[in-house]
Amino acid sequence: MKLANEFRDVELAKRLIAHIHQTSHRDIKLMEFCGSHTVSILKNGIRQLLPPNIEMLAGPGCPVCVTSTADLDKVINLSRIPGVIITSFGDMIRVPGSRSTLQKEKAQGADVRIVYSVLDALKISRQNPEKKVIFVGIGFETTAPTVAAALIQTEKEKLHNFFVISLHKVCPPIMKTILDLGEIRINGIICPGHVSTIIGGYPYQFIPGNYGIACVISGFEPVDILQTVDMLVNQIENKTYSVEIAYRRVVKPEGNIQALRLMETVFELSDADWRGIGIVSGSGLKIRKRYRHFDAESNFDINPIENNEINGCICGNILRGVATPLDCRLFRTMCTPEQPVGPCMVSAEGSCAAYFQYGVSIE
């Protein structure tokens, strides 16, 4: 707790806020890529503490939120196959597909189970050798190594009833896509802390190098984020763009080499479908041929899928940073945490859920 408390120090936060006010003179738009950063920023009132010339935008860093309707429909179709057990993180079972959710399928008799890690799913497969257990693999580079390790372990144990549907995504390609779309002019990016623990800082070098945009990798405590903003402002005001690490207690420039090797062993880059954006080349992780016998998409028949977006939901616009939940006519009326219309209200990292929980005013 001592370390955590140091990054919640009120006096240090006040000094950082004062310094940001003193040094920022131009209009600045910053995007926090990670959904956990969005939650922390709203929870701690950081946007209100910054000078009015600094605008903070949420990005596409919520893995549940960016999972496309078509991919959700694939999972829902898999849950309808007799003898299949679907294992998933809790948020996913409530996210609406085109016509159903995993929660509704469970209510109608499908065997859908919430797990807290891929190891829980692996345990279920051992306990149910007569069933086929499918783990819904979502998340960015943070969770992919654990799934890779689980598949390697599955092969060692010679289990034949465990499968993964890989909906994993990687961050740098989508960051490039957001910048190439040019819908918003971003001056600086708060790079994701958890992801960077795995991939390090080097993969972001193209952002300052090719786009002249400041980058700082941040932790999640209030002082972490304020320090990151202060470092971004310094880069922007001095036009010295680079990738800096404000989360050095966890992140190394080279990343976690062992975790990267695990990912490389089991996965290869592929195209991936992002909600609100579409197909992004090289932004997904598919299971390599060597481990293809564990790939749910290769071993089960999935009915044809149509990517039907949810009528009235603007989650895709929010994920691209061109809108906020306050721009959505469904927010707080038809769409609430108890009755979510879209994934941004379902996920604990979703912008809509964060805006709702932490009382951001509609006025």
Image: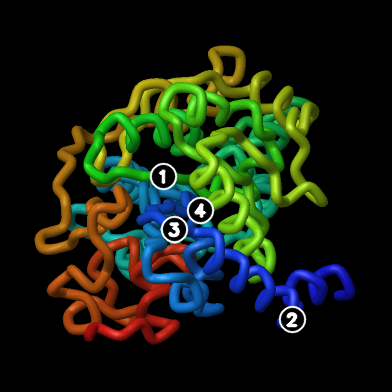
**Residue 44 image position (x, y, % from top left):** 55, 78
* Residue at 28 percent of width and 73 percent of height: 340
**Along the line of sight, which residue is nearer the eye, 39 or 132?**
39
* Residue at 47 percent of width and 36 percent of height: 169
Query: Disc 2 and disc 3: Cα gap in Å?
Result: 23 Å
Contact, mark 3 vs mark 4 (Cβ under 8 Å): no
Question: As shown in the figure, which amino acid type bears the numbered disc 3?
Answer: His
Residue 167 seen: yes
Quadrant that contains the N terminus: bottom right
Callout 1: helix, strand or loop? loop
Callout 3: helix, strand or loop? loop
According to the picture, the residue beneath numbered tag 2 turns out to be: 11
The label nearer to you, 2 versus 3, is 3
N-terminal of the pair, mark 1 or mark 4, is 4
According to the picture, the residue beneath numbered tag 3 turns out to be: 25
Callout 2: helix, strand or loop? helix
According to the picture, the residue beneath numbered tag 1 turns out to be: 187
Question: As shown in the figure, which amino acid type bears the numbered disc 4?
Answer: Cys
* Residue at 74 percent of width and 32 percent of height: 253
Query: Disc 1 and disc 4: Cα gap in Å?
Result: 17 Å
N-terminal of the pair, mark 2 or mark 3, is 2
Query: Disc 2 and disc 1: Cα gap in Å?
Result: 28 Å
N-terminal of the pair, mark 2 or mark 1, is 2
Residue 132 seen: no
